[in-house]
């Protein structure tokens, strides 16, 4: 099983938009996949946020989520994301990134020991961005 973290780009808008829609539904918002896709695309096109995606490979056989039909076993797929927004810190008098959104697909979350990727102490600042750091078992 291989996992990776990378910065999302415009070709990822559909997969990230699907996860973003699920993320909003988790917070009791109505499903609106088209608006979710549009929101994600606009943030990327306007360089208003940075989105990092977690991926897993085909060997990570998590099956299929019947609620959205998202295949979780064919090739590398986005299994979660974080969305960072640029801001500024008065104290450090410099730029900062605000981690506003963090979501891991429920099927993947259940398959990970202790759902470690959802624990804030596993996300670290590396250069400019927060990235997930897997702790050895």
Image (cartoon, helix red, strand yellow):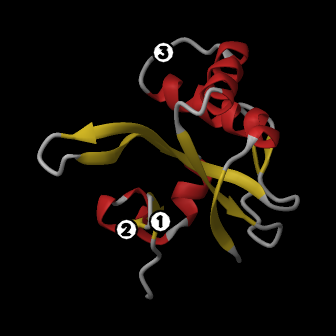
Q: Nearer the viewer, mark 1 or mark 3?
A: 1
Query: Residue 130, how many percent across, how many down?
Result: 42, 59
Query: Residue 93, how many percent across, how many down?
Result: 19, 46
First along the sequence among labels 3 and 2: 3
Say left or right for 31 vs 63.
left
Check disc 3 and report the residue beneath it.
Answer: 29
Q: Quadrant of residue 124?
A: bottom left
Q: Residues within 10 Å of mark 2 (few under 14, many from 20)?
A: some
Disc marking residue 132: 1
- Compute the Cα span from label 2 to label 1: 6 Å
Quadrant of the image for the N terminus? bottom right
> Do callouts 2 and 1 mark residues in contact (Cβ within 8 Å)?
yes
The outermost residue toward the left is: 91
The answer to whether residue 81 is above or below residue 55 is above
Check disc 2 and report the residue beneath it.
Answer: 122
Query: Residue 30, how many percent across, how many down?
Result: 55, 11
Say left or right for 67 vs 136.
right
First along the sequence among labels 2 and 1: 2
- Compute the Cα span from label 1 to label 3: 27 Å
Disc marking residue 20: none
> Do callouts 3 and 2 mark residues in contact (Cβ within 8 Å)?
no
SS category of the residue bearing label 2: helix
SS category of the residue bearing label 1: strand
């Amino acid at each position: 099983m291989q996992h990776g973290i990378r910065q999302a780009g415009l070709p990822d808008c559909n997969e990230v938009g699907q996860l973003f829609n699920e993320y909003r539904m988790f917070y009791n918002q109505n499903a609106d996949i088209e608006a979710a896709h549009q929101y994600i695309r606009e943030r990327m096109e306007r360089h208003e946020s940075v989105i990092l995606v977690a991926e897993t490979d085909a060997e990570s056989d998590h099956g299929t989520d019947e609620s959205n039909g998202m295949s979780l076993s064919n090739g590398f797929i986005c299994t979660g994301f974080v969305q960072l927004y640029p801001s500024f810190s008065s104290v450090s008098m410099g730029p900062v990134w605000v981690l506003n959104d963090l979501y891991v697909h429920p099927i993947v979350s259940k398959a990970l020991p202790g759902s470690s990727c959802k624990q804030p102490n596993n996300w670290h600042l590396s250069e400019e961005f927060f990235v997930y750091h897997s702790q050895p078992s």
